[in-house]
Image (cartoon, helix red, strand yellow):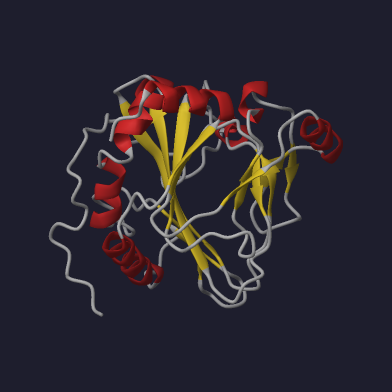
C-alpha cells in the first residue's frame, strides 16, 4: 500500500493517519484465534491481570521464534499494508520492529491510560531520535464507550515534553505529562480526536503525539495490536539495566516487504 503525498503531509501535520478496515474480517478472526492460543502459554512475554489471570498484554508476536511467535502476526507486520506506509512515513526503507504488543482492555474493568508520549519511554531505552512510527490494528470495534484511543492533533510537533513517572494510576509504569502542562497544551490545540473504528481498522501515529484512553465501560473486551517500527540507524544505544528483548528488540535486521496474504498456511476459520 502506497501513501499519497497528501497523506504523508497529513501525518506530519496531525501526527496520525487512520485507514478503516484495512484488514478483512477473516484476517481479524485468524488474529483473534491466535490471541486465544497465545494467552494459554506460560511465559513472561504474557502479562496477566492480578485477579483473573487473563492476559492483559502479549509481547513479541512478530518474530519467527520465541514462545509467542505467531505466523499471522509476523506476516501482518511485513505486509505491504503496514510496512510500506511505515517506510514512507519514516522516509527510510531500512526498518525493523522495535516491539509488538497486543493489549486487551477488559470489559468493565479495563482502566485508563494517562496522557503520554510513547517516545518518553523509548528515549529511556536509549533510542536516540523519535524516528519511529506505530501501526495500531483494531481487532475489536473501538468506541468511546469501550475506551478507544484519543489523540491531540499536532501535539507531536512540540517534541519530547518533560514528563513524570506515574507508577500508581495503573499497573503499568508510564511517563505522563503533568496536569497543568497538559491543560495548557490542550487550551492551545485542536480538541482531542477519538480513534474509533471497526475491526481491521489501522491507525499510524507519531511517537511524540500526546494520546491516552479512558475506561472500558462496555460489557465487551477490546483487543488491539501495536506494531512499532524503528529505523535501523536509530536502534537503541547501550543503557544500564535495559528492558527485556521482547519489549526492546535487539533484532535489527531490516525487514523486507512480504506478501499481502497473512493467512497462508493457516487453518480455516470455524464458523
What residue sits 61% from the left and 64% below the top?
146
| Residue farthest to the front, as pictured | 6
The answer to which image quadrant residue 230 occupies is top left
Q: How many marks?
A: 0
Residue 130: percent from the left, percent from the top? 53, 25
Tell me if 262 is positioned left or right of 210 in this view.
left
Q: Is residue 173 above or below residue 271?
A: above
Quadrant showing the N terminus: top left
Residue 166 visible somewhere in the drawing: yes
What residue sits 36% from the left and 66% below the top?
32
Residue 216: percent from the left, percent from the top? 64, 66
What residue sits 48% from the left and 22% below the top?
9
| Residue farthest to the left, as pictured | 265
Name the foreground residue: 240 vs 14.
Answer: 14
Name the foreground residue: 231 vs 125.
Answer: 231
Quadrant showing the C terminus: bottom left
The answer to which image quadrant residue 38 occupies is bottom left
What residue sits 37% from the left and 66% below the top?
35
Q: Is residue 141 above or below residue 93?
A: below
Q: Is residue 104 above or below residue 77?
A: below
Q: Is residue 49 above or below residue 182?
A: below
The answer to which image quadrant residue 169 occupies is bottom right
Residue 57 visible somewhere in the drawing: no
Residue 102: percent from the left, percent from the top? 45, 56
Amino acid at each position: 500500500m502506497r501513501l499519497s503525498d497528501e497523506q504523508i503531509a497529513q501525518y506530519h501535520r496531525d501526527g496520525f493517519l487512520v485507514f478503516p478496515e484495512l484488514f478483512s474480517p477473516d484476517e481479524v478472526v485468524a488474529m483473534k484465534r491466535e490471541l486465544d492460543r497465545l494467552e494459554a502459554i506460560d511465559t513472561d512475554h504474557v502479562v496477566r491481570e492480578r485477579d483473573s489471570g487473563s492476559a492483559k498484554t502479549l509481547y513479541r508476536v512478530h518474530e519467527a521464534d520465541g514462545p509467542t511467535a505467531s505466523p499471522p502476526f509476523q506476516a501482518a507486520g511485513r505486509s505491504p499494508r503496514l510496512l510500506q506506509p511505515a517506510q514512507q512515513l519514516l522516509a527510510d526503507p531500512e526498518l525493523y520492529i522495535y516491539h509488538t504488543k497486543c493489549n486487551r482492555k477488559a470489559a468493565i474493568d479495563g482502566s485508563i491510560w494517562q496522557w503520554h508520549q510513547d517516545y518518553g519511554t523509548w528515549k529511556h531505552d536509549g533510542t536516540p531520535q523519535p524516528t519511529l512510527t506505530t501501526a495500531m490494528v483494531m481487532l475489536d470495534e473501538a468506541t468511546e464507550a469501550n475506551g478507544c484511543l484519543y489523540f491531540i492533533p499536532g501535539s507531536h510537533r512540540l517534541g519530547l515534553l518533560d514528563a513524570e513517572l506515574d507508577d500508581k494510576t495503573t499497573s503499568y509504569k508510564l511517563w505522563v505529562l503533568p496536569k497543568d502542562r497538559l491543560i495548557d497544551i490542550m487550551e492551545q490545540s485542536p480538541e482531542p480526536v477519538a480513534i474509533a473504528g471497526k475491526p481491521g481498522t489501522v491507525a499510524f501515529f507519531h511517537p511524540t503525539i500526546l494520546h491516552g484512553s479512558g475506561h472500558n465501560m462496555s460489557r465487551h473486551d477490546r483487543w488491539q495490536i501495536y506494531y512499532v517500527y524503528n529505523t535501523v540507524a536509530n536502534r537503541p544505544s547501550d543503557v544500564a539495566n535495559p528492558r527485556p528483548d521482547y519489549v526492546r528488540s535487539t533484532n535489527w535486521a531490516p525487514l523486507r516487504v512480504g506478501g499481502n496474504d497473512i493467512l497462508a498456511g493457516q487453518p480455516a476459520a470455524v464458523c
